[in-house]
Image: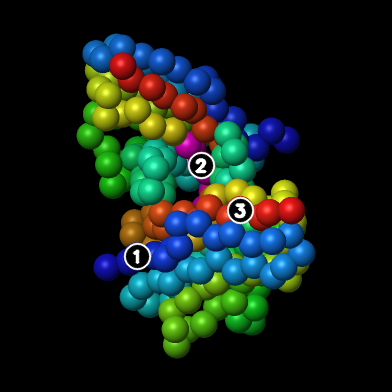
Amino acid sequence: NAGVTQTPKFRVLKTGQSMTLLCAQDMNHEYMYWYRQDPGMGLRLIHYSVGEGTTAKGEVPDGYNVSRLKKQNFLLGLESAAPSQTSVYFCASSSGTLVADTQYFGPGTRLTVL
Amino acid sequence: AQSVAQPEDQVNVAEGNPLTVKCTYSVSGNPYLFWYVQYPNRGLQFLLKYITGDNLVKGSYGFEAEFNKSQTSFHLKKPSALVSDSALYFCAVGFSGGYNKLIFGAGTRLAVHP
């Protein structure tokens, strides 16, 4: 049981380049999330999904797109990377709709945009 | 508005001494409170959560947290700190906002010295 995995672990982009981050979970969770972590700011929600085929915006969605074609995968795309998107990106999943459900996190992707 | 505050950027403690990492919250309605730990270059790991019931919650690695409704606090504690406890600790509050939403504090870095 791998839990939540993320690909790649590290990436360096030039301004204007695009890339996709992949998140996979093997816990059969309905909910999946993408966060970004910046120093002194905790984690902020970018986008989330409440089930296969659904996505919605979080707190800081600008410049990102997501897709959830399969229940176990949640992709985060950057169409035209900017230096302000330099951050550590975390994917998370939770089993259902209860507020009390625990979110489980992947190991993160460190992205640098030059 | 829902919010979480971790008033200390860093906590220093000697190995073997008790440790406390502070967290205060502001929510409307019943709070659902979480503690996560992040070791260097790793993702967030769930430590414990308060949903309802006993104000003292026990979690992983010997950690516990005390929920205090009158002081709106959820401080993380451990009776005897280990050097291996050195990490970044995040408090989070969960509430229903169309999805299973978590608001994170900015994090507190715990340094345990031999």
| Viewer can see residue A48 | no
Q: Nearer the viewer, residue A11 or A79?
A: A11
| Marked residue chain, label 3 | B
User: Residue A95 lies in magenta, yes or no?
Assistant: yes
Note whether B69 is above or below A81 in the view shown: below
Residue beneath disc 3: B111
| Three-letter residue code for mark 3 | Ala
| Viewer can see residue B57 | yes
Percent x, y of residue B82: 74, 56
| Three-letter residue code for mark 2 | Ala
- The kind of secondary structure element at disc 2 is strand
Task: Kindly report the distance in space between the C-alpha atoms of the residues bearing marks 1 and 3.
Answer: 25 Å
Note whether B23 is above or below A44 in the view shown: below
Residue beneath disc 1: B3
Percent x, y of residue A53: 40, 33
Whether marks 3 and 2 lie on the same chain: no
Mark 3 Cα shell of 10 Å, populated few (<14), some (14-19), many (≥20): many
Residue beneath disc 2: A92
Q: Nearer the viewer, residue A9 or A67?
A: A9
Write down the quadrant of residue B1 in the picture: bottom left
Task: Kindly report the distance in space between the C-alpha atoms of the residues bearing marks 1 and 2.
Answer: 20 Å
Residue span colored magenta: A90-97
Mark 1, mark 2: which one is toward the viewer?
A: 1
Residue located at (60% from left, 69% from top): B20
Residue located at (36% from left, 14% from top): A13
| Marked residue chain, label 1 | B
